[in-house]
Image (cartoon, rainbow, N blue to C red):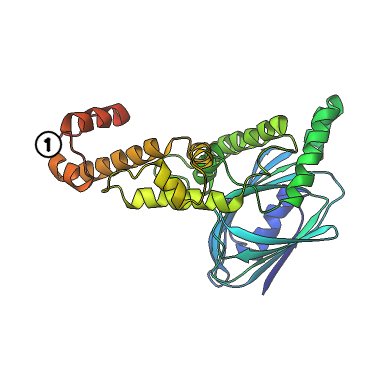
């Protein structure tokens, strides 16, 4: 078991601590694991002296234990992740164990005054983004608005009571992927991460401002969210078949038609039919311009029956006709 003990009081100390433990010869923001411990890296960025962005992107090659010590300051920790943890709350500490349970991604919100013990097992894949808001950053705003301070406290309180029920919205999921899995062929620098970290932070404040104890995200059924993603994966795997219809998809998700339709659109920012048609067009683009297939071959493979409608839809999405190079 490789054990690391730290806190979030100072980002520079935290970065130096993990660099000394994992990658002492490095001087970059990216700290790579030694092969015997993991494959991948940790990254630490300062959005400002009072706001930190942390990125975890690795596969554990050994068992790892993280002990995050509580601190006196009432800092806020936002943890966006696409791996599963099973949580237990013991007094003023959270005990978190890596889980093989399916998760489409979720977010939790904590005070830094509550410590945590996290167990990551060998073979675990960890992809997460954490944003730490120092109390010196939030305090001036809370002093001006006691209502905002109360909303944040309630938000965190309910977060702990429903710690496994958060999920990433469509916008959060896209921003998360851009941070944790950036396109290395385009831009990868400090401003790239900071810009997306700020936008991810904005989604949290919007949730807080509109949140009431009876509303989302805590009433969301996490198993239903998983079923939505199973249905969307089914659609992506069956692009060659006709669209089966919302009623059938709702049955597959074990949900009512209305609940399924509304939740699907909230998660994917598209209706099920729009999602299906867009995935078909994306697949046709790759077949034509990467695989060199003819329009007829693509239409036969993806069950398109009308070439005029196909070409028009293709142009509307990509601003190019599919036969331009043929």
Task: Please tell me how crowded label 1 is: few (under 14), some (14-19), or many (20+) other residues with Cα within 10 Å.
Answer: few
Q: Quadrant of residue 247?
A: top left
Image spot of residue 211 (x, y percent): 71, 34
Q: Is residue 133 left or right of residue 57?
A: right
Q: Residue at x 68, y 43 (%)?
A: 52
Residue 296 against residue 160 in the figure, above or below: above
Task: Please state which of residues 153 and 72 is positioned toward the viewer in this rendering.
Answer: 153
Q: In the shown orientation, is residue 191 left or right of residue 296?
A: right
**Image quadrant where one finds the N terminus:** bottom right
Residue 197, horizontal then vertical, whole percent: 60, 39
At 36% from the left and 49% from the top, the residue drawn is 236
Snapshot quadrant of residue 304:
top left
Could you tell me which residue is drawn at 38 percent across and 52 percent down? Answer: 234
Q: Is residue 170 above or below residue 251?
A: above
Residue denoted by label 1: 326
Please indicate whether residue 99 sits to the left or right of residue 249 in the image.
right
């Amino acid at each position: 078991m490789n054990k690391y003990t730290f806190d979030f009081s100072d980002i520079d100390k935290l970065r130096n601590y993990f660099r000394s433990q994992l990658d002492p010869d490095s001087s970059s923001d990216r700290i790579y694991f030694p092969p015997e411990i993991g494959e991948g890296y940790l990254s630490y960025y300062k959005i400002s002296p009072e706001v930190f962005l942390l990125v975890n992107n690795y596969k554990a090659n050994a068992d790892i234990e993280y002990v995050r010590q509580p601190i006196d300051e009432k800092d806020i920790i936002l943890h966006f992740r696409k791996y599963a943890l099973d949580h237990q709350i013991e007094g003023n500490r959270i005990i978190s164990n890596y889980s093989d349970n399916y998760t489409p991604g979720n977010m939790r919100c904590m005070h830094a005054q509550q410590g945590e013990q996290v167990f990551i097992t060998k073979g675990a894949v960890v992809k997460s983004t954490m944003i730490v808001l120092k109390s010196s950053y939030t305090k001036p705003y809370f002093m001006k608005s006691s209502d905002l301070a109360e909303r944040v406290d309630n938000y965190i309180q309910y977060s702990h009571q429903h710690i496994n029920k958060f999920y990433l919205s469509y916008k959060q999921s896209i921003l998360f992927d851009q941070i944790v899995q950036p396109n290395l062929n385009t831009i990868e620098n400090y401003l790239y991460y900071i810009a997306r970290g700020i936008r991810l932070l904005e989604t949290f404040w919007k949730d807080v401002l509109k949140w009431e104890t009876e509303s989302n995200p805590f009433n969301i059924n996490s198993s239903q969210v998983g079923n939505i993603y199973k249905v969307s994966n089914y659609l992506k795997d069956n692009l060659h078949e006709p669209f089966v219809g919302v009623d059938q998809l709702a049955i597959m998700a074990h949900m009512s038609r209305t609940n399924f339709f509304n939740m699907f659109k909230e998660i994917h920012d598209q209706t099920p039919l729009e999602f299906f048609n867009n995935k078909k067009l994306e697949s046709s683009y790759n077949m034509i311009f990467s695989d060199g297939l003819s329009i007829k071959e693509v239409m036969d493979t993806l069950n398109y029956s009308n070439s005029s409608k196909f070409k028009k839809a293709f142009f509307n999405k990509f601003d190019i006709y599919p036969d331009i190079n043929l």
